[in-house]
Image (cartoon, grey):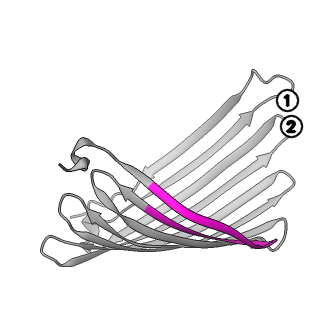
Amino acid sequence: LNAYAFGSEGNLVAGMKSRIADSASVFLEERYQHNNRMTGLTHGTGINFAPTQKWSLGVTTDIGKLLDVQTGAETDRLAGGLKLGYANEGLTLSSGIEYRSDEVEQLDLGLTERKTWLFRNSFKYQVNDAGRLLGKVNHSESESSQGTFYDGGFTEAVVGYAYRPVRNDRLNALLKYTYFYNSVNRSV
């Protein structure tokens, strides 16, 4: 019997993280995933570097092979990312860029390629002891070698205000506005 037919799914992550200096750490991960659609193993590595208390920099990679449970088609994945962070006196800023290339085997044994870019930005600002302003802007573009019909992307913007009075822990409020635009290209 195929266990996937019953909807079992999950991820298993094993790895290690080591601090190699006061300002740098590295990690290695093995990620096994299985669900009703894909199964496979990817290898993640990365380094985080904080040259000062205010600045941080991170670099990551993700390499692996996934298998389509229904068709047996293989997907070779290659991904990388870069993240920059800043924190000082109640202000936290973070910005990152990620790139992923998936080569997907088709039923006719040909290959298609999907290239995806993701840009992430976020901020938090501690207005006072009880209030915090927060926000993020994420944007992704995906391009397929099969043509513009299979291209896509999205834009997400969030701004919010969290109120948590120090003297009254029974009151917590979050006011948040989210804008989301799904830019699926259907020009045929």
Q: Nearer the viewer, residue 148 or 107?
A: 107
Q: Main secondary structure of the magenta part?
A: strand
Quarter location, residue 130: top right
Residue drawn at (75%, 32%), measured in percent from left and top?
163
Which badge, 1 or 2, comes first in the chain's sequence?
A: 2
Residue drawn at (82%, 71%), measured in percent from left and top?
22
Q: Amino acid at mark 2?
A: Asp
Residue drawn at (19%, 58%), measured in percent from left and top?
70
**Of the numbered discs in the image, which one, if any, rests on residue 183?**
none
Magenta-colored stretch includes residue 14? yes
Magenta-colored stretch includes residue 142? no
Quarter in which the C terminus is drawn: bottom left
Q: Residues at badges 1 and 2 in contact (C-beta under 8 Å)?
A: yes
Name the residue beneath numbered marker 1: 166
Where residue 91 appears, as percent x and y from the top left, is: 80, 54
Q: Secondary structure at mark 2?
A: loop
Q: Residue furthest front?
A: 1
In this image, 12 relative to 109: left or right?
A: right
**Of the numbered discs in the image, which one, if any, rests on residue 129?**
2
Q: Residue furthest left?
A: 108
Asked if 173 appears above or below 89 in the picture, the reply is above
Where residue 133 appears, as percent x and y from the top left, is: 73, 43
Q: Residues within 10 Å of mark 1 (few under 14, many from 20)?
A: few
Q: Amino acid at mark 1?
A: Val
Where residue 4 appears, as percent x and y from the top left, is: 25, 49
Q: Nearer the viewer, residue 139 or 1?
A: 1
Where residue 51 appears, as percent x and y from the top left, is: 81, 74
Q: Nearer the viewer, residue 112 or 32?
A: 32
Quarter location, residue 173: top right
Residue numbers of the magenta segment = 12-31
Asked if 132 appears above or below 169 in the picture, the reply is below
Q: Secondary structure at mark 1?
A: loop
